[in-house]
Image: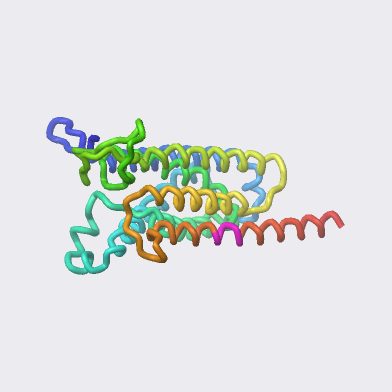
């Protein structure tokens, strides 16, 4: 793997390069979603969006999400963190998916209020872009070999990371690559749901709920072949967080669809 690119006197970490790429591409995806919904959004009273709101949202939510991912990662080992906090806080490696989700979610709540878009509809718009950004970011984990790989395997596509940040000479599951493809598929599914929403009424928040459910299931399953330590009931922290994501997604989906049907019935009556 290639943890760093050396360009003359410059040393560029490939993880950081892919994170920047992830933010850039996801901003384009988000902007495309805003643009195709423009007609509907402009009917919202007080809507304060502009033609480049997608880039603004990704810029703010991306930075806050990265901070949340880093903080959550270091707090997974509190004794090590409090023993020597500053080097761990500002390390270029080690980011937790659930922490990034929480940080980004808080930022998105603020931005939805700022743009005067209903929160659930705003989360629907952001969900495909979030999947794309996560997928590309995982390529950064693969290139740097930062320990996000899986257990040893004899499968023909197994990979070793002898020059990684967390090196291994064993052939292991390239789980970042698995996640890259899985999250792109989820992004495509959510994007198609958004296209349907543009054509016909749909419960606001349904796309976001599917994001919570599908990504939660994917992460829960991928953890079975990851090397993360087990803690809560024999599960990794990521698996426990994934179950919370799935439960919230299912519960919220039931609520928004029930509310949507009730409003539709009232209007038709």
Q: Examine the rendered structure and indicate whether residue 255 appears above or below residue 28.
A: below
Q: Quadrant of the N terminus?
A: top left
Determine the residue positioned at 17% across, 33% down. 6
Identify the image's colour scheme: rainbow, by chain, secondary structure or one colour.
rainbow
Query: In this orientation, which residue lies closer to the viewer: 59 or 134?
Result: 134
Give the residue furthest to the front.
Answer: 154
Q: Quadrant of the C terminus?
A: bottom right
Residue stretch in magenta: 247-251
Q: Position of residue 25 (x, y in %)?
A: 42, 37
Q: Examine the rendered structure and indicate whether residue 237 appears above or below residue 21.
A: below
Give the residue furthest to the right.
Answer: 269
Magenta stretch encompasses residue 234: no
Q: Is residue 139 left or right of residue 49?
A: left
Q: Examine the rendered structure and indicate whether residue 67 appears above or below residue 142.
A: below
* Image quadrant in which you'd find residue 24: top left
Magenta segment's dominant SS is: helix
Determine the residue positioned at 39% across, 53% down. 97
Determine the residue positioned at 57% across, 40% down. 189
Q: How many marks?
A: 0
Q: Position of residue 5 (x, y in %)?
A: 21, 34
Magenta stretch encompasses residue 249: yes
Q: Position of residue 123 (x, y in %)?
A: 54, 53
Determine the residue positioned at 36% across, 34% down. 155
Q: Position of residue 125 (x, y in %)?
A: 55, 47
């Amino acid at each position: 793997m290639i943890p760093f690119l050396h360009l003359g006197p410059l040393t560029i970490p490939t993880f950081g390069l892919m994170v920047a790429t992830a933010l850039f591409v996801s901003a384009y995806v988000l902007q495309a979603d805003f643009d195709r919904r423009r007609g509907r959004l402009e009917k919202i009273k007080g809507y304060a969006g502009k033609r480049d709101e997608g880039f603004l949202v990704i810029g703010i939510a991306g930075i806050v999400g990265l901070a949340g991912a880093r903080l959550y990662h270091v707090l997974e080992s509190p004794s090590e963190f409090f023993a020597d906090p500053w080097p761990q806080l500002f390390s270029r490696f080690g980011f937790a998916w659930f922490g990034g989700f929480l940080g980004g979610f808080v930022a998105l709540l603020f931005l939805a209020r700022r743009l005067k878009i209903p929160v659930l509809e705003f989360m629907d718009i952001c969900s495909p872009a979030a999947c794309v950004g996560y997928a590309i970011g995982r390529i950064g984990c693969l290139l740097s070999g930062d320990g996000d790989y899986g257990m040893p395997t004899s499968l023909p596509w197994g990979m070793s990371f002898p020059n990684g940040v967390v090196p291994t000479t064993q052939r292991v599951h390239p789980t970042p690559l698995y996640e890259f493809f899985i999250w792109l598929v989820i992004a495509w599914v959510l994007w198609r749901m958004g296209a349907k929403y543009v054509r016909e009424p749909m419960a606001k928040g349904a796309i976001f709920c599917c994001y919570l459910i599908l990504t939660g299931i994917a992460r829960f399953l991928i953890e079975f072949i990851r090397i993360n330590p087990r803690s809560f009931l024999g599960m990794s922290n990521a698996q426990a967080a994934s179950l919370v994501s799935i439960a919230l997604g299912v519960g919220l989906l039931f609520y928004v669809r029930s509310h949507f049907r009730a409003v539709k019935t009232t209007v038709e009556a």
